[in-house]
Image (cartoon, grey):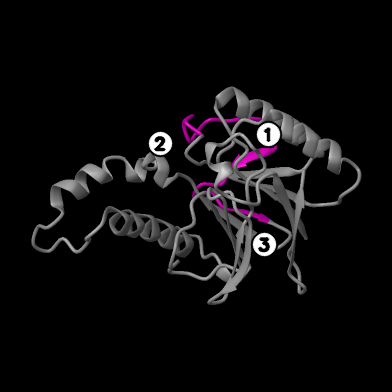
Amino acid sequence: MKILSISDIHGDVEKIELLVNKLDQKEDFDLIIIAGDIGDLDETNKILDILSSFKKQIFYVQGNWDSYPYGTTFNKQAIHIHLNHQTVNGWCFLGYSGSEANLYRGNKSLEGSFEFFAENKGKPGFQFGTYYQYRRSIIFKEVFNYLDKNDIDVDDLVFISHDRLFKLPFTPFLYIFGHEHQHMNNYHKGIHLLNTSAISKNSDLDTDYGGVGNYCLVSLNENFKVEFNEI
């Protein structure tokens, strides 16, 4: 099974058009994954419609650029996989949406969490010294409970988020993320870690990070392989 993995589009419709023109009829893949920061509502509509020309399913999570409600629907090929797993060719795909950059705005599980942390920090029995630790505990509990409730085998799991969540309490086969605009392909503590990089060059951060303007192709088989490519 082969995945086209992209992230951090930042509303750059032109780059998606270039991607489609570059890959049309030239590259065979089974699925498209977007690791967040697609754009605003209108841009996301356009981008997902353009990508639908591949006639493949599109699984996406939201990042800090994606301010529309989590329940927003787009074309039928695009599925928001925030705590909404999908199975393709024996592989399970599960995402978690949001970003530290906007305090996970739109994520109902984390609404008010910063205020709660600020009110309780330092109180007896409150064990979290930083908001990052507190927020991560909420996310991990929610994801772990979802995996348990749905009896998901993590050996066949591809997990996707926008920000990288460190020290996962489970070991998916592959963890895909973006946000930092820098491609990475590592194997650490039983998990293939993939920062799929940024496909756009619209961000102010692009002068500070390398690897922008990239997409990647991932082969999920016995010979796991990642290919980074420039637009």
- Verify CB contact (< 8 Å) between mark 3 and mark 2: no
Q: Main secondary structure of the magenta part?
A: loop
| Residue annotated with mark 1 | 76
Please state the horizontal and vertical placement of residue 203, each as a whole percent of the image: 56, 36
Measure the C-alpha gap from mark 2 to mark 1: 22 Å
Residue for point 39% across, 37% down? 105
**Most distant residue in the left direction:** 124
**Amino acid type, label 2:** Gly
Q: Which mark is residue 106?
A: 2
Q: Which mark is residue 91?
A: 3
Please state the horizontal and vertical placement of residue 96, each as a whole percent of the image: 49, 50
Residue for point 76% across, 74% down? 222
State the residue in front, 172 or 204: 204
Crowd around label 2: few <14 · some 14–19 · many ≥20 (10 Å) = many
Q: Horizontally, is 17 left or right of 115 in the view? A: right
Measure the C-alpha gap from mark 3 to mark 1: 20 Å
The range drawn in magenta is 66-87
